[in-house]
């Protein structure tokens, strides 16, 4: 027979055990309910609004702690617009270090995420910034601001808002010697035009398969095709479109054919805006004194056949002005990469950028 003392001891032991279990359960529930630190969640720099840009709360996309996209609004361009940022791998580990910056301008029908198709853009030698340029923004302050797209001051957005916003929020080396603008197709026009418009901002420029000669009727026609949403006429093949097809998902709503640069017809000076912003115009090329200029093009297909002509025109005129430039005409692509067919696509642009980015890194270093 068990003694009363044994029963007392048993009840005490059970009580102590139950108390311990209950206490542990409460502690566990408290732990589950408490906010976690998310130590494994990538951390990105904190950005402060400014220069006319306001971040859209909850719209930031974080791919990693060195690859993320902000979404901003601005009174200069209607709607919401992404700015994708690639940071060097040791950006966080070297808080006292400042970095050069390359701005990458995507092509027509594309967007900021197209940059993922060229891995070399995510360089450990520089910060890369990819601002939205619109499906057919053409990196211009549009002549018409009352189209279906509303306000469209892309050049002002990029040069007077995005650039100082990045300099204010990231550890950049904020001078022209350490700032580049690089673009392809529509963005190839934008890159050369921006370097000409603001040689105080950019000391390096590269244009890949760019529409860089507005004296060519074929290139003016390509701009019109984007305004009229004629899908497939001048479209950067991107990660968001059928790879290798040369087709886009579209250029957005139809707008007037005079919307971006005004009338394209050289009658009684009606095309004065086209002439004023023409990257191939000698007066504009002369502004590239002291700027490192690199041009890439193939010569296959209905688009790069004309970008090669435009590239050669720019090269010839720069030579006449006594301005140095580097031209890589990879023709059918066989000398560039197995993926390149000489056409208007990332099969050529990705290896061209893989050639250019290390050269740019060396140029940045030489000016440090």
Image: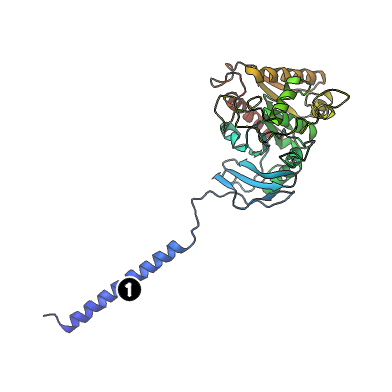
- Residue 172: % across, % down: 68, 43
Query: Residue furthest toward the bottom?
Result: 4
Residue located beneath label 1 in the image: 19
- Where the N terminus falls, by quadrant? bottom left
- Name the one closer to the observer, 59 or 179: 59
The answer to whether any part of residue 227 appears in the image is yes
Q: Nearer the viewer, residue 161 or 2?
A: 161
Q: Is residue 329 visible?
A: no
Q: Nearer the viewer, residue 204 or 331?
A: 331
Q: Position of residue 49 (x, y in %)?
A: 69, 52
Q: Residue at x 59, y 23 (%)?
A: 348
Residue 309 position by quadrant: top right
Front-lying residue, 221 or 60: 221
Q: Is residue 209 left or right of residue 3?
A: right
The percent position of residue 83, horizontal first and vertical second, equals 65, 42
Mark 1 lies on a secondary structure that is: helix
Quarter holding the C terminus?
A: top right
Task: Tell me what residue is drawn at x 70 percent, y 18 percent.
Answer: 306
On screen, 294 above or below 331?
Answer: below
């Amino acid at each position: 027979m068990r003694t009363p003392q044994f029963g007392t001891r048993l009840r005490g032991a059970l009580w102590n055990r139950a108390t311990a279990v209950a206490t542990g359960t409460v502690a566990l529930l408290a732990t589950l309910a408490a906010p976690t630190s998310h130590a494994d969640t990538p951390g990105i720099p904190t950005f402060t609004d400014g220069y006319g840009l306001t971040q859209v709360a909850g719209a930031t996309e974080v791919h990693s702690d060195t690859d993320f996209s902000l979404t901003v609004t601005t009174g200069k361009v209607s709607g919401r617009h992404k700015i994708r940022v690639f940071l060097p791998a040791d950006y966080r580990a070297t808080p006292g270090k400042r970095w050069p910056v390359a701005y990458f301008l995507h092509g027509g029908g594309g967007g900021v995420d197209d940059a993922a198709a060229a891995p070399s853009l995510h360089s450990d030698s520089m910060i890369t910034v990819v601002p939205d340029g619109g499906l057919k923004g053409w990196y211009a302050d549009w002549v018409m601001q009352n189209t279906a797209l509303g306000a469209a001051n892309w050049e002002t957005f990029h040069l007077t808002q995005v650039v100082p916003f990045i300099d204010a929020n990231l550890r950049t080396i904020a001078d022209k010697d350490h700032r580049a603008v690089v673009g392809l197709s529509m963005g190839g026009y934008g890159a050369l035009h921006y370097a000409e418009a603001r040689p105080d901002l950019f000391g390096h420029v590269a244009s890949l398969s760019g529409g860089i000669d507005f004296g060519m009727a074929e290139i003016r026609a390509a701009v019109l095709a984007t305004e009229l949403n004629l899908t497939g006429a001048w479209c950067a093949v991107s990660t968001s479109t059928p790879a290798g097809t040369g087709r886009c998902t579209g250029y957005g709503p139809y707008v007037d054919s005079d919307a971006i640069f005004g009338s394209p017809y050289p009658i009684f000076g009606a095309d004065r805006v086209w002439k004023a912003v023409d990257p191939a115009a000698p007066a504009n090329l002369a502004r590239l004194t002291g700027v490192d200029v690199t041009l890439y093009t193939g010569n296959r297909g209905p688009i790069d056949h004309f970008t090669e002509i435009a590239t050669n025109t720019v090269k010839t005129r720069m030579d006449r002005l006594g301005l140095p430039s580097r031209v890589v005409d990879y023709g059918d692509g066989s000398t560039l990469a197995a993926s390149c067919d000489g056409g208007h696509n990332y099969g050529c642009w990705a290896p061209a950028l893989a050639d250019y980015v290390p050269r740019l890194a060396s140029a940045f270093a030489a000016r440090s």
